[in-house]
Amino acid sequence: MTETQRKIAFLVCLVTIVLAVLDMQIVSAATVPIVRDLDPDHGIDKIPWLVIAFSLASAAVLPLYGKLCDVLGAKRVFLGAVGTFLLGSALCGAARSIGQLVAARAVQGVGAGGLMSVTMVVIAQLRGPGERDSKGAGMGGIVSGGGMALGPWIGGLLSDHASWRWIFYINLPFGLAVLVLAACVLKLPRHTADRSIDFLGAGLAAAFSTALLLVTEWGGKEYAWSSPQIVFLALASVAALGLFLWRQLTAAEPILPLSMFRVRELRWGFAIQGLVGAALVGALYYVMVYLQVARGVASSSAGLYLVFMAVGMTAAGVVTGKLAERGLPERAFAISGSAVTAVAFLLLATTGSDTSRWWLRAELLLVGVGFGQLIGQLIQLVQDAAPRHQLGVATTGIRLFQTLGTALGAALFGTLVSRLYDGPGPLASVPGTARTAEVHAYVDALDGVFLCGAALMAVCLVVATRLPGSRPVQSAGEPASEPATV
């Protein structure tokens, strides 16, 4: 590829990840017009499935996407994922009932699972042998922070001034441009060896992640933790995990080879990413809860506070990328990022119902600086250390661990708040001075969440010290032999 083609390809990857991140967040601001249009009587009860269907489908296909990249080549899988995402977006925009919209969101989620993970494989293969890519390493922090902060705002803007259907239709022109440009400029290694795909292993992985995500989504909310439904799902997830591990030990071409966990960078990199995913829930969701409950900030305005977190992630992603190019190992960023984020969570735990909003913004900026050092560089670390023929599996593996960590973090924090706060019900229904006391009690419960987040990042710091102090010699983007290109 020429340098111009590589720049175009990098821009294509950036747009692709932005689309994926935005669609994780954008629906939250459009729930009211969706319900009003499709099912004003009973639709509100089905709204959570718009998020659940997307998340379940996205997580379930991650291991399969990685294996397909290693067997078929990243370009073909990338084009297929974008095409599936666009099909799901078109179906979402055309939905005439909540049920149709939920089904279309699942199709969209299948594509989105590839948009986030396969795109990072493409970025790795755009690098030359042994080349460091500060853009690719910093992209995770930049687009994740920006998408998380701006997604709800964009969703609300489109819903208010156009139609909620445009939060899905807007994907089509950008996605079609991505498809055309990727088909024209991408020239990546194409694997010609005859290798099988372990579809049984992929199915077991999907069953495990689906059951686990449903446990964390429904537990303590839709059903009690001790209810037959949650107990059954928990047992099903354990059984699926056991069968999956057995399959990986016996399959000729496992979907997630357990031999990867012998590589220290992969083993500890996966663990750190899972902890980061869990802690990120506390920073995103419960700061928004604090602003709305304790400070009376509207949901649309509360989302704008995350801009400060996005700025921190962006700045940290760019700076760490530049330092990485000069030879600083990923271990340094993992240690520094974990320490900074732990301190930021401790500061959030001191936030009360009368804390200055500018002080809160500064705390969120610090959270972003911490996470920005971790997200992009961890992907870089795993890709550089992965065996060359397992680049796709390693990249989607780290994304899967973050997804599962997020689910477990949501369950942990939700349970913690319910145990620490024993209020009378919705705070809006509590009158006068009693409400003030209840707000203080709820903020105290949220402090427990942030302390728990600090503890998770302290564990992350300890794990980060287990990473090697020098870079892997091998470049993950380098093929094992002179490949064909497609």
Image (cartoon, rainbow, N blue to C red):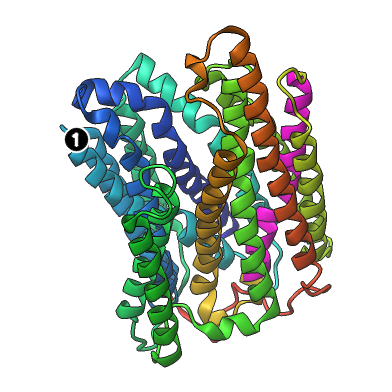
Viewed as shown, does residue 243 lie left or right of 263? left
Note whether 65 is above or below 214 in the view shown. Answer: below
The percent coordinates of residue 244 (x first, y second) are: 40, 79
Q: Which residue is mark 1?
A: 95
At 36% from the left and 21% from the top, the residue drawn is 159
Disc 1: CA contacts within 10 A as few (<14), some (14-19) or many (>=20): some
Dot 1 falls on a residue whose secondary structure is loop
Viewer-nearest residue: 81 or 393 = 393
Viewer-nearest residue: 486 or 262 = 262
The percent coordinates of residue 310 (x first, y second) are: 65, 36
Residue 376 among magenta residues: yes
At 50% from the left and 56% from the top, the residue drawn is 403
Check the picture and name the quadrant holding the C terminus: bottom left
Q: Amino acid at mark 1?
A: Ala
Provide the residue span drawn in magenta.
357-382
Q: Splitting the image into 4 quarters, where does residue 57 fall?
A: bottom left
| Predominant SS along the magenta part | helix
Q: Splitting the image into 4 quarters, where does residue 221 fall?
A: top left
Viewed as shown, does residue 369 lie left or right of 234? right
Viewer-nearest residue: 199 or 356 = 356
Note whether 159 is above or below 219 in the view shown. Answer: above
